[in-house]
Image (cartoon, rainbow, N blue to C red):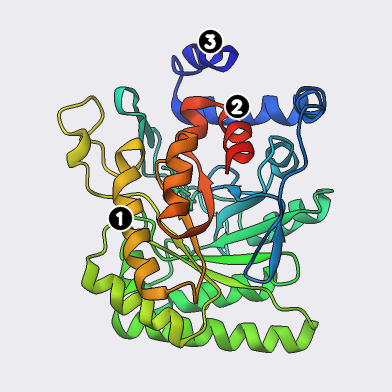
């Protein structure tokens, strides 16, 4: 109830400003606010995935905390893991504002942020500063000015720098807001990417005596045929997990509604079924050889359970948090 009152005020202002105001508030208030709720928390069952121990199945999706500035506040909310980023080798400002749009009646969000972030070095500083001892995934991407032919290099730079600070690394090749990025999901570009990141992972494992799992984050706009090819390659290259899915370019489910014609990736409830369908197809091919992290439109306990029943070992949310607030996190983690 309390969050829905605050939401009324937050929804009067620009979505990007509302996002930062909320996170800043949570950062300041985190101790008082969440310690109160923690008193009522019962111990939860831990989950093993990618060789790591997660305190629960629900994570904060990439994009909520691009620069790792709110790791503790998000953890205090109850999330079992936090995926920070997307970060790129160099800082970049992203697309012009406004670049986030709400589709309130459908609990949807369209964003075209374009990897605005302060760069990998700044993220490392923030991770080092934080006292968080849980699972931090670091989601990495390529800089806008790096050509798609040289994109792999950007991923390798980020992997090399972040390796010892990340619990796992997520390779984002599915954001629709960086030109040609999604081409990395296909053919020889995809195979080369997988080959080179696995080689880098092996080198760094030897150097640091530490294995850091690597997950690939995919788009919901792939056909079944494309998904089958991707899944087979993931198995071939022994990728540690697949994150399904990023936002969709298909706005047909919100057509006619305010903001539906804005360019960018659609998330939230309108993405729910599409991402679940992708998880269902993937899980049939992967047969639990590679874990799936399910994300897209989770806005209730039922939709969280549906993702898990469809084959996801872990789940993440972003838009659901905007529409339902921190209570949704607590409700989900206590019921799945
Ligand atoms: C404003 C916004 C920014 C996002 N930024 C990123 C990002 O930087 N990297 C990424 O991999 N996904 C990003 N996402 C996608 C989410 O991580 C998630 O995959 C997608 O929103 C579907 O989940 P949801 O329906 O729970 O929001 C972003 C989503 C939103 C709404």
Q: Is residue 223 left or right of residue 106?
A: left
Badge 3: residue crowd in 10 Å (few <14, some 14–19, many ≥20): few
First of labels 1, 3 by sequence position:
3
Whether ligand 1 has any atom under 8 Å from the Cβ at mark 2 is answered as no
| Picture residue at 20% right of the left edge, 26% below the top | 257
Q: Which x, y percent locates residue 250?
A: 22, 48
Q: Is residue 122 left or right of residue 291?
A: right
> Which residue occupies the foreground of this view, 56 or 8?
56
Residue 62 visible within the image: no
Which type of secondary structure does the marked residue at label 2 adopt? helix
Q: Which x, y percent locates residue 198?
A: 56, 84
| Picture residue at 60% right of the left edge, 44% below the top | 65
For marks 1 and 3, give the one nearer the viewer: 1
- Which residue position is annotated with label 1? 277
Above or below for 7 versus 317 = above
Mark 1 and mark 3: Cα distance apart in space = 34 Å
Residue 228 visible within the image: yes
Above or below for 105 versus 66 = above
- Which residue position is annotated with label 2? 327
């Amino acid at each position: 109830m309390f969050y829905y009152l605050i939401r009324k005020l937050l929804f009067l202002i620009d979505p990007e400003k509302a996002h930062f105001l909320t996170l800043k508030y949570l950062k300041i208030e985190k101790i008082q606010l969440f310690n109160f709720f923690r008193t009522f928390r019962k111990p939860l069952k831990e989950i093993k995935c990618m060789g790591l121990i997660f305190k629960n199945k629900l994570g904060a999706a990439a994009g909520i905390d691009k620069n790792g500035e709110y790791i503790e506040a998000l953890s205090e909310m109850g999330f079992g893991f936090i995926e920070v980023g997307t970060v790129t080798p160099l800082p970049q400002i992203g697309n012009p504002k406004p670049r986030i749009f709400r589709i309130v009646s459908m609990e949807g969000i369209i964003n075209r942020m374009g990897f605005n972030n302060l760069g990998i070095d700044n993220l490392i500083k923030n991770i080092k500063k934080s006292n968080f001892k849980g699972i931090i995934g670091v989601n990495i991407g390529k800089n806008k000015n790096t050509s798609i032919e040289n994109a792999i290099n950007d991923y390798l730079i980020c992997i090399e720098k972040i390796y010892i600070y990340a619990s796992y690394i997520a390779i984002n090749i599915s954001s629709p807001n960086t030109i040609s990025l999604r081409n990395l999901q296909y053919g020889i570009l995809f195979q080369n990417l997988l080959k080179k990141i696995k080689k880098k992972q092996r080198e760094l494992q030897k150097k640091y005596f530490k294995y850091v799992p690597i997950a690939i984050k995919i788009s919901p706009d792939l056909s079944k045929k494309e998904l089958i090819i991707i899944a087979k390659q993931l198995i071939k290259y022994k990728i540690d997990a697949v994150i399904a899915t990023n936002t969709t370019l298909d706005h047909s489910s919100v057509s006619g509604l305010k903001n539906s014609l804005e360019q960018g990736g659609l998330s939230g409830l309108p993405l729910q079924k599409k991402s679940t369908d992708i998880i269902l197809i993937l899980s049939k091919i992967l047969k639990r050889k590679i874990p799936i992290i399910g994300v897209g439109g989770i806005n209730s306990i039922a939709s969280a359970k549906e993702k898990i029943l469809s084959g996801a070992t872990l789940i993440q949310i972003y838009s659901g948090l905007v529409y339902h607030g921190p209570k949704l996190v607590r409700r989900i983690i206590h019921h799945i």
